[in-house]
Image: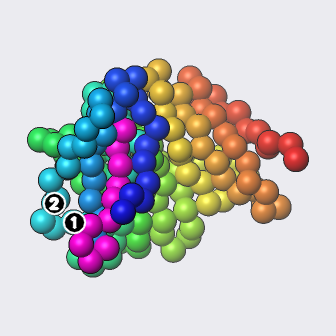
Amino acid sequence: LFRSGSNPNSKGQIALTYAGTYNIYHLALWERGRFTLVPDLTEYVFSGAQAINDRGQITALVYNSSGIGLGFVGTFEHYNVFAYPGADVTLTLAFMTSDSGTTVGGYADTAGAHAFVFDGKDFSTLGVNGGVNSEALAINNEGDIVGNYWNSSGISTGFELVKGKVTQFVVPN
């Protein structure tokens, strides 16, 4: 049973999530008309493929045995599972990884949801003035980031971070 899939990368690869026996989710790669199953991780359960970059690295959500959502970035042979640091973090959701290996996403803690950037070693929180419950949704190979947050009036607002400058925007009705 197919659950979700990423946008195709420039090579036409698509990362997919599907439900197997007992409704356990797995990852697969669709490329040139054929499926390749991503080997399951013994200590984690896959939940959703988010993106695939041109290096073939899949960005996904996995859960550990305690039910904590963690970020996953990797290929069949090499991968990294990570959590935003903090004792009260309950979810780390990675949305996209650039070809250089920088991942963007969001994490949740007792204060709400927050956008982050992860370079493979260090995390940075992206704060947007007047924003709450933010998430970084995409990054390109130049390092430009787009995401969203809710302003103090409860309106969903977009942002882009280009060369260190944040621009906020609201899509008109």
Q: Within the image, what quadrant is residue 132 found in? A: bottom right
Q: Where in the figure is residue 82, as x and y percent of width and height?
A: 28, 55
Secondary structure, mark 2, is loop
Residue shown at 25% from the left, 43% from the top: 35
User: Tag on residue 44?
Assistant: 1
* Contact flag, marks 2 and 1 (Cβ < 8 Å): yes
Disc 2 target residue: 41
Residue 27 higher or lower than 67, as above or below: above
Badge 2 density bin: few <14, some 14–19, many ≥20, Cα 10 Å: few
Q: Where in the figure is residue 72, as x and y percent of width and height?
A: 29, 51
Q: Left of 148 or right of it: where is 125?
A: left
Residue shown at 20% from the left, 43% from the top: 36
Residue 70 higher or lower than 136, as above or below: below
The amino acid type of the residue labelled 1 equals Tyr
Q: Where in the figure is residue 144, as x and y percent of width and height?
A: 53, 28
Residue 154 higher or lower than 75, as above or below: below
Is residue 120 visible in the rendered structure shown here?
no
Residue range of the region highlighted in magenta in the rendering = 14-23
Q: Left of 170 or right of it: where is 33?
A: left
Residue 83 higher or lower than 33, as above or below: below
